[in-house]
Image (spheres, rainbow, N blue to C red):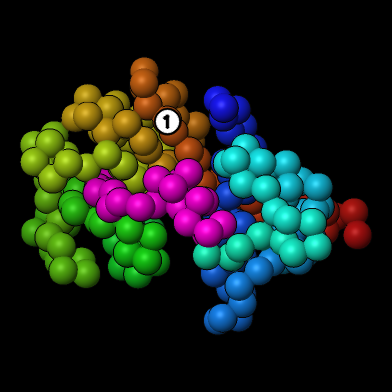
Amino acid sequence: MVRRPVPRVTVQRLPVYLRCLESLPAGQQRVSSDELAELAGVLGAKIRKDLSYLGTHGTRGVGYDVEHLKHEIRIELGLTRDWAVVIVGIGNLGRALANYGGFGERRFRVVGIFDSDPLKVGRRVDGLTVEPMELLARAVTERNASIGIVATPAHAAQEVADALAAAGVRSILNFAPVVIKPPEGVEVRRVDLSTELQVLTFYLARS
């Protein structure tokens, strides 16, 4: 049977489901869609529909096998192998990202950190040495980096994204406070903390 393509909105929820499954008590073997829905903050029907795209269906009255479901989600998210990551922009945010221990738990390895500021080049951050942008392309190739994180000021973000794409990176996580035009063939995800705060103040202003 041919599996249906997984919708983008479902993909965005799968990491949440995985984290919820991993938070269950040690030794819990089964989980119902309603229990998982409560942990994830969604409806049980949405859980069942999302997981059906993976070819996974719970048993009525029994639920899902926890370990099997975690394995299926990890496969779908590509978390059964390591992914090499480079970070560009080693200001406060870039240093914090380079020091973040959670990447390794999800099999993301930071293999290079880069900055255009000669005063930062050569400094050590969590065991890595800040390298100049001139070495980015070679590093991406030699270290098989497939994901780039942009943590630069807004004015430099597009140029950096283009440089990452030219070097062979096909997925970019953008922390710069600007919308990047995705280079051809590159998936770009944006994380904008100020935007999220403004969404919160929208609701605060009406409470």
Answer left or right for 53 relative to 109. right
What is the magenta range?
68-92
Q: Which residue is at the front of the view, 153 or 195?
A: 195
Q: Residue furthest right?
A: 207
- Residue visible at 47% across and 56% down? 71
Mark 1, other Cα within 10 Å: few <14 / some 14–19 / many ≥20: some
* Image location (x, y in percent) of residue 83: 28, 49
| Vertical placement of residue 22 versus 76, above or below | below
Q: Which residue is at the front of the view, 131 or 65?
A: 65
Quadrant of the rendered image containing residue 5:
top right
| Vertical placement of residue 8 versus 68, above or below | above
Residue type at numbered disc 1:
Glu
Answer left or right for 11 relative to 74. right
Is residue 82 found inside the magenta-colored segment of the image?
yes
Q: Which residue is at the front of the view, 203 or 120?
A: 203
- Residue visible at 19% across and 30% down? 167
